[in-house]
Each structure stands twice: as structure tokens, then as C-alpha cells.
Amino acid sequence: MKYSSITKCVITAAICASVCSCNKKGFTLQPITDFKVETIKPQNVSLNSSYPVTIKGKQDIEIRPQVSGFIVELCVDEGATVKKGQTLFRIDPVQYEAAVESAKAAVESAKAAVATARLASENKNELYKRNIISDFERQSAENSLKSAEATLLQREADLVRAQQNLSFTKVTSPSDGIVGSIPYRRGSLVGPTNATPLTVVSDISEMYAYFSMTEKELLKYNRQYGNTNNIISKMPKLKLRLSDGSLYDGEGTIETISGVVDPVTGSITVRASFKNADRLLRSGSTGVVLFPYVEENAITIPQSISYEIQDKRYVYVLNADSTVTNTEISTLNIDDGKTFVVTEGLKSGDQVVVEGIPSLKDGMKINPIKE
């Protein structure tokens, strides 16, 4: 194969360029890149301990009938807001109305018997004063009067009981609150012996949040504040994170701390209260209570300077020879979503790389730029 002189020149130039390129690659060092670093300085940090809570109403009152009968009317529906004394159910009152009328008649009959016995007693007293009858007859008349009066009292008590039973056919709410589920409907036969209540009325003007605190945590607060009463009075206000992740507007206060440690879990039950004027919280809800405290001399880093591999978190620490080492750390979340509190892996005075993290490699040499 024959080549022209121009072609030969082009091939020769390409070969020379290739050789020069290989030589350059073999002998040129990688450039050292600038990276910003920061020195770790401990500081006091406001943190939140979080505890899962179960939320209950101030009162969850089971509504049970005090008389037996068929439900003839449901006056409220599930989830309704009710006031104290408001009628919730009506039980068939016919038999109880009849009982009241019968009791009234018995009272009137007893009153007539008392009046007759009184006349007889007064007559016997006059005859006794004239020595016409014996003391036995006079005393017998007085005893008959007392017996009639006692019978009247009994009949009046029966009337009160009958009237009370009649009033029980209107099942009313014992407090302000929210009506729960209603398992019995119109036509259902109910009575005091029913295992399931007619409904539950929850007083949710104030809500109780129950959570567990470890014995170790309680001991820390005991040393810090003193006895239990001092702990309750000096504890900071609590915040409540709802099940959707949002924060509840109102703040809560700790009201009670159980005096018994659960031997199985080693925990102590704590109750906090939250005002619920807007009725946003409902009995049976769940959430997380946030307990604020100050961590002294804490090591904090921006979340952005760390990276995660297989559920482990790392940062790049600058060495004395300007190389970097990927260092595993243990962290706590601060509630701002931007910062970590480092509990293990870093110490005061360490220098960490704060930018260009994806381009770094373990052992890589950099030119540190301090902010």
C-alpha cells in the first residue's frame, strides 16, 4: 500500500501526540483542591426528648341506663357535642308512668287511712279522759295512727322511686363532651345489666397525655429539681406533635408522676394536660410529646456535611497532613431539621470538611480553607 507524503505526515503527527499524552499522564500529579473546613466547638443546645403518648379526655363517662325498656328515641348522633343535662336517649316510659300513677293512688289511700286513724285516736283519748275506756284501747288507737303514718311514708317513698324511675327513661349527659359510638338503636331492649354502655361521653375541654419516662431519666430530674412536687412545678412546658406530624398550638404541663416503677419495663407513667378549646384533640388519639431541655457542651454539625452508608453516618475529618478520613459518628436529631448533635465520633477541636462532600474520598489530600 502506498501513501502520499501528506498522509505520512499526518500519521506521524498523530503518533507523536499520542506518545506525548501518555508521557504526561504518567508523570503529572493530581491537583490539590480547596475545601472549606470548620473546627468543632462545643456549645449549649436546646433539645427535645420525645415520648409517644396516648391521649384521653379529662373524663370518659360510660352512659348506662338505670331502668329497663325499649329505646324509643335517639336524641343525638355519634360525634355530637352535648351539654350537661342534655337528653341522649329516651326509653319507653309507659310502664313507669303507670307506676307513678299507681304510687300516687297508694299515697292518697295512705293519707285517708292516716286521717281515719287520727280521728279514732282523738276519740279514744276523749273517752279515756272520761274513764269510759281503758288505757289499752287508747294506746291501741295511737298505735294504729302511727302504723298508718308509717304506711304513708312508705307510699310516699314508693312514689318518689316511681317518679325517679320515670325520670330515668330520659337518659341525659352527666357532663359537657363529645358522644362516642352508639351500639344500640331505636327498638333495642336495654337495661342496667347490659355489658356494653349506651355510649361514652368524653369531656375533651382538657386532654390528658399519658407517656412513660425511664427510671434513669426520673433520677436525673430528681437530682436537678429535688422531690416529685418540685419536679412537677419546675418542669418546662411541653409541646405535642400530632399523628400527622404537625405541632399542636397549645402547650401542656406535667400534672402527675406515678410513684410506682413498672418492674417489666423499668418505666414510670407521667400525665400531662393540654387545653383543648378548639376540640382538635380527641380521646384515644396518639402523638408524641416533646420535652425541652438544654444539653451543655454539645457538639453540633450541619446535617448537610454528613452522609449515610448502610444506616451509618459519616463525616470527613481533616488530619494533620491535610488528608481526610471518613469517620463514623452517632447523632441525635435536633427538631429544626438542619442540625445533628454528635454523641460519638467527634471531639472538641476536630476539623471537619463542610463542602464538596460527594467529591471527597477517604485518604484524599486537600487544601483546607478555614471559614
Image: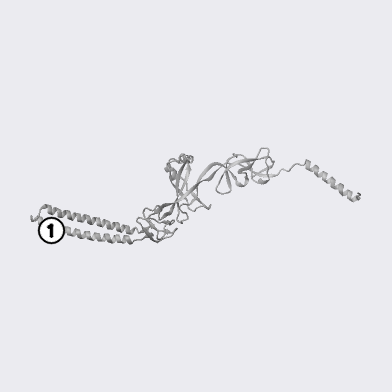
> Who is closer to the viewer here, 200 or 366?
200
Q: Position of residue 231 (x, y in %)?
A: 44, 43
Among the 4 quarters of the image, the one containing residue 188 = bottom left
Say whether residue 31 is left or right of residue 58.
right
Among the 4 quarters of the image, the one containing residue 71 = bottom left
Q: Position of residue 113 (x, y in %)?
A: 19, 59
Relative height, residue 172 to residue 349 (above, below): below
The quadrant in which the C terminus is found is top right
Relative height, residue 124 to residue 29 (above, below): below
> Who is closer to the viewer here, 157 or 253?
157
**Colouring scheme applied when the structure was drawn:** one colour
Disc 1 packing (10 Å; few <14; some 14–19; many ≥20): few
Relative height, residue 189 to residue 311 (above, below): below
Q: Position of residue 271 (x, y in %)?
A: 44, 47
Q: How many marks?
A: 1
Say whether residue 44 is left or right of residue 230.
right
Q: Position of residue 139 (x, y in %)?
A: 14, 53
> Who is closer to the viewer here, 160 or 141?
141
- Amino acid on which disc 1 is placed: Asn
- The residue depicted at 52 percent of the width and 44 percent of the height is 294
Relative height, residue 15 to residue 181 (above, below): above
- The residue depicted at 12 percent of the width and 56 percent of the height is 125
Residue at the far top: name it. 320
Residue identified by numbered label 1 = 123
Q: Give the structural element (helix, strand or loop) at label 1.
A: helix
Say whether residue 30 is left or right of residue 73.
right
- The residue depicted at 10 percent of the width and 57 percent of the height is 127
